[in-house]
Image (cartoon, grey):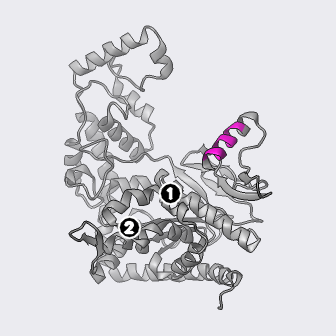
Amino acid sequence: CNSGLRTMWQQQVRRRSISVGHSVRCVNPAAAGGIVGWMMPPPVICNHYTVPLGASYRPGLSTRYMHGAAWVAADANQHPVRIFSGIQPSGQLHLGNYLGAIKNWIHLQDTHSTHPTASPEAVLFSIVDMHSLTSTLVASRDTEGAATPTPATSSALSNATRDMAIALIACGIDPERVILYPQSAVSGHAELMWILSCITALGDLNRMTQYKDKKDHLGSMLGLFAYPVLMAADVLLFKATHIPVGHDQLQHLELAREIGHSMNNIFREPYFPLPNPMLSKAKRVMSLRDGTQKMSKSAISDKSRINLTDSDETIRLKIQKAKTDSFAGISFEPERRPEVANLISIMSAITDESVDSIIARYSNGNPHSLTTPPTHQQQSDNTQPQQQQHAQQQQQQSPWDWREFKAELATHLVNRIGPIREQIHRLSDKPHEIDAILHNGAQQANALAKPTLDQVKRMAGLFI
């Protein structure tokens, strides 16, 4: 069905028989009008995010952009714009977390919570500690290799939740402008999940690639299997219209849209908005020791990542020791030069300077420098392959000096991370203030979730 939807979408867009932003439906010919699937339309690349057109992918709804997609609005007659995103309290944050998610959260906070037409509850950020239970409660394996639940330290997860709140606030998240709360403090997440799970097909959950990837080391546990249903409940509980996600979460969000659409069909009214993905343009930050691996707190070598609590000296040393290659010149070629491409991406993300501009500044007229990877058209030119081969041979013969580039990158990182580190240390000495912030956020989230949950219970026939 999905393959057919994509083919149909591509063909109709080429024939211009439908317009971008309209919904595309796969209809079962055996049952007139039977909708068996929906496909999200192709996204539009904007300044900070990739935002698909159409507030709910239905004709008549629109998405408008101001200042290069700095503001995204849904049709006020349908559902007001509401942004929801969550992050697991997974321990110490590093540069990859900051550039990949938190920096974008701050942008959303700045552009949506202060907009004149924004609702007071326009942006919600949740520390999704319930999602973390899929790993924290499974800490060992028996002799046959099956995962077995083990008792967790009662304070470990709650402390990690508090530490995550501290890091988010230190990075710039303002609890006065957004709702920041722990997921477990809002029971509506679990209650709505059960209702949604009653209409979610096992086949849909079996197709989730993240479950297939994680079950080998976390075990075939129900919580891990039903994880996407809880994620759908997270989104639908607040009638969120836009969800900042990475490409690896698109499949989960598509399932959330399908579940929301199914609930609307059951209730015979468009009660839930179908959430739109907001894909950040931020590049995935890779390890400083291996450009083919994602920067991770679980990596054995601490030199592979920049922690948000690292000292200035440690940051400079890690960047100085970061792996590059033996080619001369500077070029952005992730396949051929992954470590170099990673450093350039970090420089671009931390300074908001384009990759092309960075390369131009450091090329200095070096004839061996390739500013961009060769295109397919260039490769088809009879003379181009010889020129490329000659340039590559010269690069291999003349290693490039990375000291100036690394020194500048380290300075930018120190200037950005230094204040965050100091704020983390200051807030860590005030745990009661952080707890008060989380309790206040939970109260706001509960007040926002209760009308939705109560109405769903009524429509489902539950006694309330």
Determine the residue positioned at 79% across, 55% down: 60
Magenta span: helix, strand or loop, mainly?
Answer: helix
Identify residue type, mark 2: Ser
Q: CA distance from mark 1 to mark 2?
A: 14 Å
Report the quarter where the C terminus lies: bottom right
Q: Position of residue 380 (x, y in %)?
A: 48, 14
Q: Please tell me whether mark 1 sits on a helix, a strand or a loop.
A: loop
Residue 6 left/right relative to 162: right
Residue 6 drawn in magenta: yes
Q: Is residue 149 above or below residue 23?
A: below
Residue indicated by mark 1: 207
State the extent of the magenta-drawn residues as a range: 3-11
Identify residue type, mark 1: Arg
Q: Position of residue 345 (x, y in %)?
A: 38, 41
Q: Is residue 22 above or below residue 363?
A: below
Residue indicated by mark 2: 220
Q: Position of residue 147 (x, y in %)?
A: 30, 70
Determine the residue positioned at 24% across, 21% down: 396
Residue ranking furthest to the front = 30
In this view, the residue in front, 354 or 239, is: 239
Residue 135 drawn in magenta: no
The answer to whether any part of residue 42 appears in the image is no
Say which mark, if any, is on residue 120: none
Q: Is residue 354 above or below residue 265?
A: above
Q: Earlier in the sequence, mark 1 or mark 2?
A: 1
Residue 423 left/right relative to 109: left
Residue 349 left/right relative to 443: left
Determine the residue positioned at 56% across, 73% down: 197
Determine the residue positioned at 55% across, 59% down: 253
Residue ranking furthest to the bottom = 464
In this view, the residue in front, 373 or 137, is: 137
